[in-house]
Image (cartoon, rainbow, N blue to C red):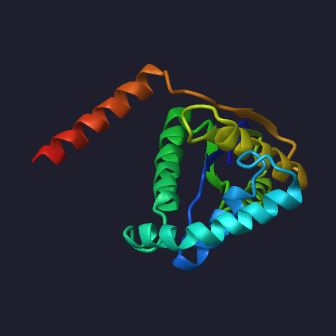
Amino acid sequence: MGAGRRKIAIVLFNLGGPDSPAAVRPFLFNLFNDPAIISAPGPLRWALAQFISRRRAPVARGIYAQLGGASPLLANTRAQAEALEKAAEKALENSGEVRCFIAMRYWHPFADETARAVAAFAPDEIVLLPLYPQYAAATTGSSLADWNRAAARAGITARQRAICCYPEDEGFIETVAGLAAQAWQRARR
């Protein structure tokens, strides 16, 4: 890498999803054990998360079975990360190296795993990109708080900035509206 080239890590955040039928209950437990989802004291939240995840797992397994037995979210997020990495490299015109990382909130790869990978990359700058367009404590807030904990644990000291909350961005609205119109047209055929 030439002198002056910055190393930029982009961390994409998403909810996560079970990668197998056996992962459904642990995924649901992680979801409902998050204080941003159930704000009860720790031991009570843990017990509620156990109860809810056991009750909901059979139904959720059936839903995921219709999707091939696993959530497509990680594969979709990986595709987004690859496309973003290529676009960012092109936009920087060889003035920087960009690497995208994925941190899922409730299933692998967790923020701890991702923070260790980002630390090994040793970036000069980190861009935190929640893939939830609107802010909610249970999505963006929980993901960023979990990242901050994991980044501190991994010893990350690079400058970080979060891109947050873009549901009213004109490009976002136009893209979503266009995709919805295409889906509507396909459904009408």
Quarter holding residue 62: bottom left
Residue 145 image point, x, y percent: 79, 43
Residue 64 image point, x, y percent: 45, 68
Kindly identify the residue that appears in the image at 73 percent across and 32 percent down: 161
- In the depicted structure, whether residue 186 falls above or below residue 78: above
- Observer-nearest of 96 and 31: 31
- In the depicted structure, whether residue 160 falls above or below residue 74: above
In the picture, measured across the screen, residue 175 lies left or right of residue 49, that is: left
Going by the picture, which residue comes out furthest to the bottom? 22
Residue 45 visible from this viewpoint: yes
Kindly identify the residue that appears in the image at 62 percent across and 45 percent down: 98
Quarter holding residue 148: top right
- Observer-nearest of 160 and 187: 187
In the picture, measured across the screen, residue 164 lies left or right of residue 58, that is: right
Residue 108 visible from this viewpoint: no
In the picture, measured across the screen, residue 69 lies left or right of residue 145, that is: left
Quarter holding residue 159: top right
Kindly identify the residue that appears in the image at 73 percent across and 68 percent down: 50
Residue 186 image point, x, y percent: 17, 46
- In the depicted structure, whether residue 103 falls above or below residue 36: below
Kindly identify the residue that appears in the image at 56 percent across and 42 percent down: 131
- In the depicted structure, whether residue 106 falls above or below residue 161: below
